[in-house]
Amino acid sequence: MAFTRKSADISLPEDPLHLYRMLAVTNRGPSAVWGHQQDVLRSWHQDKSEASDVAVELPTGAGKTLVGGLIAEFRRRTAQERVTYLCPTRQLAQQTAAAFDDYGIPNALLIDRVSSWNRADRARYEAAEAVAVSVYSHVFNSNPALDNANLLVLDDAHAAEGYVANPWRLTISRQDESAYLDVLSALEPALDPLVVPRLKRNDTDNAYWSYVFLASPIGIADRAGRLEEVIGSAINGGKLEEKRAKEARHVWKFLQGHVDRCLFYVAHRQIVMRPFIPPTAQHPAFSDPARRIYMSATLGAGGELERAFGRRKIERIPVPDGWEEQGTGRRFFIFPELATDLAADPDQLPSFVSSTIAEAGRSIVLTPDVRTSNSFIASMLPSNCPVLKADDVEDDLSAFTSKRSAALVLTNRYDGIDLPDGSCRLVILDGLPARGDLQERFLHESLGAVEVLQERIRARILQGSGRATRNTRDFAAVMVLGQALTSYLSGRDTQAAMHPEVHAELEFGWENSRGHDSTNMTENLRVFLQHGDEWAEVDGDIVRERQKYARSSAPSTRELQRSVKHEVDAWHAIWNHQWDWALTAVRSVLDKLQGERTPRRYAAFWNYLGFSITQRLAQQTSDQTYLVSSAEFFRNAQRMSTGTSWLSHLASPSDKATAPPAPQLDELDEAAMRSIGSQALGGSGSAFEETVSTIRTGLMGTEFRAYEAALVALGTLAGASESYGNEDDENPAAPDAVWLFNDARWVTWEAKSEAQPTGMVGPNDVRQAGSHLRTTESERGTSAPSDSVSLLMSPKPAVMPEARALAEEHLYLVGPEQVLDVFDRLLRAWRSARGRIISSLTATELAEIFQTEKALPSQWLPLLRKAPIRQQRD
């Protein structure tokens, strides 16, 4: 008989673990669920199964596909739910479907164009007879093909921000010159008049080539109608290349009518229009399902996941206990730019990289942007090495793994490529992975709000470095290139925020790269790749070091996590034209960003949004009290963005017409003058002269204790509200002197007064001095103000090349004669001020005296910042 009949006795699983025991009877998967997988599944089933948004963290190699698959299949069987399991790429979707086949989980692979889908497979999903396995773009789309799921499982959620934002992100490329210039012209009232002509110039020598400007939201609101007309004409009037026009038309369906509620990021090569946080609450294909499960190898904290998906709160199931002490394979990090010979002669670096690639055979190269990728291909690869790109391996990695030698070069793609066992033994990370779309580049480079991207950057590094270590027996070398990435990974706080295994690997690689030449590095690399007894001896060192480390949270994590639900509320209100609600949410954001480690530059951005919203409300309501709030928001934005130029570049006609007048005295100078005034200008004449004599003697000598004491006293003369040192050397890592100018600026010192005035400053001194701001932040439990600096005082005239590679942007080299110059300026100003009637001097009048002697902080600080260590030369 050919009829299909249902069984009268279909038993349902009690929980996901019972489900797998049922599946394991006939499937091709593992015989049982691992202990840590069981912990996660129990935690979800017992505590989180009814939650609408739950994130599950399981590192690479921990079997998160099986965990996600069992949750999906359990809900499908027990609640007859339609379940969609989303992956970032077609390749990962195919791998997931194949894994589900092995596990015995019925699935329907729905990728590529919708018209090509197997209708029977789609029907099985619709009838809740199979889990749909697909890609993000089939849900996050203006016309989603999968829009009726009851449960969404979102794999590799840590890397999904770009896929989620795509439906609300419109890009006008410089390749479509006419469209780009039309939109740029429409944006002119919202941009600095000095910037626009430079953006219009089409030349590669343009100094503004890579800078990202934020157009004034006030100017955008004023020109919304004209902008909508110009953008619509560009999209539908044949001004875009056909593929780009097709993509733009889909996005325009979401953005049309919302121009005044988007941010416009403008760079020389493209213009991007998008809301800061995607309004996913108004996208039924994502928001209607009763539940969403976010699977990730690294979830982190600080609200990164909530911002990416536009959700107020996502509950978390953390890594199971004990997993922090386990690793997945072994990575050997090497830092060629720290090798003594390559640091001294960077022209030899391409030859070293090329020979290493040739010896390794197959290598995967991960870069943050097209420019870095093209530069690497042109200068670093062996001449006969085949080059493959993402499209070459999207459906089949054998195009790469079948070759004896090849380089797989990927741009901004740190996930989704699995190269286990002997597929690849060399991973190359070239450049800091912080150059995604223009919004990300604006946050990182223009605004300088690094803290809000820290989790994203670390996740990319962790995922990228692990592309070729996919199980406990895997091993691969990881070559780190680019000063920004080398410096970032050398930072102790960066390493401390990593998994303890990676922390130990990074520290081991750093120690075995600096102070050695490239020949030694090559020999070590060969020992590692042979992976024999000689390597086994040193591998134990990494394992022992791992036991000493515990992962710590990055600065500002707590504040950013507290603020994120209000950030989502603010953009939801903005998108719905509810400006009064948006203002309330912005105030809540700024309240939550205040704390032990306030992320000041990110707070500056939100203050600027508050300024824009209050200006808008003032125009709509004619309520002048909004203008008072507007001025406060704007001045806070100015104060918190000190040291960056993004706000000065907002000198658009729109902002100039609404911004309050600048304060008469710089915040830093005002803090110093108030502090100096409160000291009654140094007490009696004899006491003052004795103090300055002691300071001069200390600064002119070399004995370290006297010099450090003199620096502390000099900070008081300079107007620091607090100036202190490392008494009794109780903490070897602490700064020798710290000057705090309230919350306007911090200055930390590392003094090498006893060093000889010959030779070069070495890596240890640079690394120690560069960490002083973070040490001070930890001790005081608060974040350093924007544009705070670390100063390394040394009589040595130069910095070793390998030390320059470690230097952070806030670190400067200062000579003893520059310190004395500052002292003399301050002394002259103090003596002039002491000749006046002390009680009659206001902060402004005191500032006039100090300004005459060039003794204001805004005048002497540039003197100490003339020599950024990153830019030093032999």
Image (cartoon, helix red, strand yellow):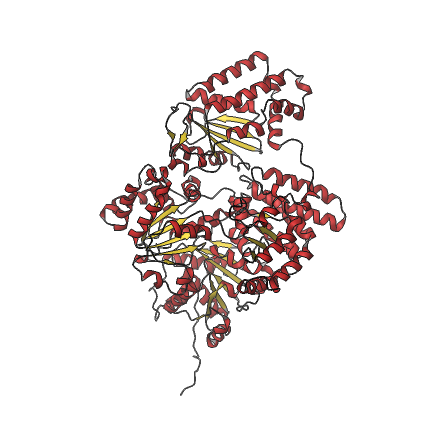
Would residue 356 appear left or right of 278 to someone viewing this image? left
Q: Residue furthest bottom?
A: 1
Would residue 404 appear left or right of 560 to someone viewing this image? left
In which quadrant will I find the N terminus? bottom left
Residue 165 sits in quarter: bottom right
Residue 702 percent coordinates (x, y):
42, 20
Q: 559 or 282: which is nearer to us?
A: 282
In which quadrant will I find the C terminus? top left
At horizontal 36% and vertical 46% (from top left) the residue drawn is 350
| Numbered circles on residues, count | 0
Residue 329 percent coordinates (x, y):
33, 52
Q: 659 or 503: which is nearer to us?
A: 659
Residue 171 sits in quarter: bottom right
Residue 241 in sight here: yes
Q: Residue furthest top?
A: 686
Q: 814 or 748: which is nearer to us?
A: 814
Q: Residue furthest left?
A: 533
Residue 547 in sight here: no
Q: 797 or 634: which is nearer to us?
A: 797
Residue 449 percent coordinates (x, y):
54, 44
At horizontal 62% and vertical 39% (from top left) the residue drawn is 638
Would residue 44 appear left or right of 843 to someone viewing this image? left
Residue 491 percent coordinates (x, y):
42, 40
Residue 746 vertical position relative to residue 20 in the rendered view, above or below: above
At horizontal 34% and vertical 71% (from top left) the residue drawn is 26
